[in-house]
Image: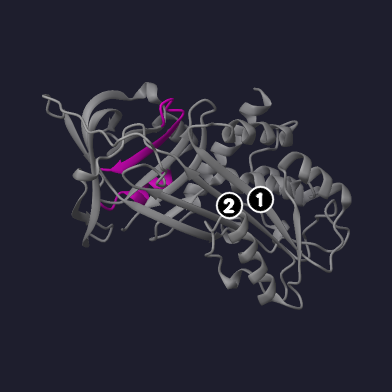
């Protein structure tokens, strides 16, 4: 296995592990890759048990030259001219700590990341305002929703990772087919939402034994980026899928060779999710405990002082509209098409579903989400 393949395998395993642990009745969208690279960056400064715990949770125990692998993967993913993918990781460190020059240099080398020095201890609100303003400026206003609860007087080190994607569908959803329709929540409550519609030839798979259907929605002309919508047959079936999904299943469900091209009518709700998640408790449940402990953390390669990780904040914005993940100005007209054929089947995502966005050349999972209510 090459270094790049090892990194992708680690990311995809980490994605599934997160999916199993993320329990919520709210809409969720995560970029596991941004979180993984952020934690791999912290792992550069970890030693002994703190390091071994982190590597186990991140699935990088047996990976050699792991940091160059992340650098190569991020370079491959961000060089496309068909979409814009921006992933950034920043460490915000309490100003009373002396950060190792070696750590600063290698974090720039492998992750193009800088450490921001802030006054958590004496001015927590000002530190939070600095973080929000810094994020707003660096991400052109995409992220402004970081909670004030993120920081307090005891905060020592906060890792903030951000991700956003600009991409257009290969086949856009004609605006003329968007209509208000009923969406059934997992509680069986009915609500109205804007549903987008399109007819065309798409990859689809129906798995009767597992009571779900999967549709593939590609982006761009090259279709290197694809969204997979995993829709349970029942309105309340998403929780069972989420808790029981395995690495092997996720790879199988996102394998185009297991799908069948079909002339189909698709209905998908318009949605926009702006998420800000504190991942500390989730990562603890996954087995990464010492790095968050004031008495057990060993980040001596970052600072010789008693430094521990206060939190990991994952900020992601995701929008699915008629154009794609976010509206992008295009010279192409939104062309519908006439067909004398009737659709062979209908895929109607009118109840909670899972979605995954994957880079096809590397098979790397970029985004994982749950859409549970409009």
Q: Which residue is mark 2?
A: 162
Q: Which residue is mark 1?
A: 89
Label 1 crowding class (10 Å Cα cut-off): few <14, some 14-19, many 20+?
many
Judge from the rendering whether residue 164 lies leftward or rightward of residue 269; answer left or right.
right
Quarter of the image that includes the C terminus:
bottom left
Residue in view at x 48 percent, y 53 percent = 317
Quadrant in the rendering for residue 79: top right
Residue 42 image offset from top left, x and y in percent: 73, 50
What stretch of residues is rendered in magenta? 220-244
Residue 326 visible in rendering: yes
| 240 is within the stretch colored magenta | yes
| 13 is within the stretch colored magenta | no
Q: Which of the numbered marks, if any, corresponds to residue 122?
A: none
Residue in view at x 57 percent, y 44 percent = 86
Residue in view at x 70 percent, y 45 percent = 40
Quarter of the image that includes the N terminus:
top right
Return the residue nearer the eye: 325 or 38.
Answer: 325
Are circles 1 and 2 on residues that touch, CB within 8 Å? yes
Judge from the rendering whether residue 93 lies leftward or rightward of residue 125; answer left or right.
right
Residue 177 image offset from top left, x and y in percent: 19, 43
Separation of residues labelled 1 and 2 (CA atoms):
7 Å
């Amino acid at each position: 296995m090459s270094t790049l393949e090892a990194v992708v395998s680690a990311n995809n395993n980490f994605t599934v592990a997160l999916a199993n642990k993320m329990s919520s009745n709210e809409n969720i969208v995560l970029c596991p890759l941004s979180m993984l690279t952020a934690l791999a960056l912290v792992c550069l400064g970890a030693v002994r048990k703190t390091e071994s715990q982190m590597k186990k949770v991140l699935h990088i125990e047996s990976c050699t030259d792991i940091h160059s692998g992340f650098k190569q993967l991020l370079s491959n993913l961000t060089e496309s001219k068909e979409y814009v993918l921006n992933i950034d990781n920043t460490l915000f460190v309490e100003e009373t700590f002396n950060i190792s020059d070696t750590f600063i240099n290698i974090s720039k080398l492998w992750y193009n990341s800088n450490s921001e020095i802030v006054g958590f201890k004496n001015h927590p609100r000002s530190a939070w305002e600095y973080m929000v303003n810094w994020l707003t400026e660096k991400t052109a206003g995409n992220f402004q929703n970081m909670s004030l609860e993120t920081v307090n007087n005891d905060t020592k080190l906060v890792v903030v990772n951000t991700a956003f994607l600009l991409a257009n569908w290969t086949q856009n959803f004609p605006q003329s087919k968007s209509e208000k329709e009923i969406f059934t929540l997992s509680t069986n409550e009915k609500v109205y939402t804007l549903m987008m519609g399109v007819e065309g030839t798409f990859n689809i798979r129906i798995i009767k034994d597992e009571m779900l259907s999967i549709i593939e929605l590609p982006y761009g002309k090259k279709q290197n980026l694809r969204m997979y919508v995993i829709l349970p047959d029942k309105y309340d079936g998403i929780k069972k899928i989420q808790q029981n999904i395995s690495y092997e299943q996720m790879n199988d469900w996102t394998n185009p060779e297991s799908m069948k091209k079909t002339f189909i009518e698709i209905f998908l709700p318009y949605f926009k999710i702006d998420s800000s998640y504190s991942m500390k408790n989730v990562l603890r449940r996954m087995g990464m405990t010492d790095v968050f402990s004031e008495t057990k953390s060993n980040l001596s390669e970052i600072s010789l002082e008693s430094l521990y990780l206060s939190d990991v904040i994952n900020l992601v914005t995701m929008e699915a509209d008629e154009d794609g993940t976010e509206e992008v100005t295009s010279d192409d007209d939104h062309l519908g098409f006439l067909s004398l054929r009737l659709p062979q089947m209908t895929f109607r995502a009118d109840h909670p579903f899972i979605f995954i966005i994957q880079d096809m050349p590397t098979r790397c999972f970029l985004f994982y989400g749950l859409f549970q209510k409009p």
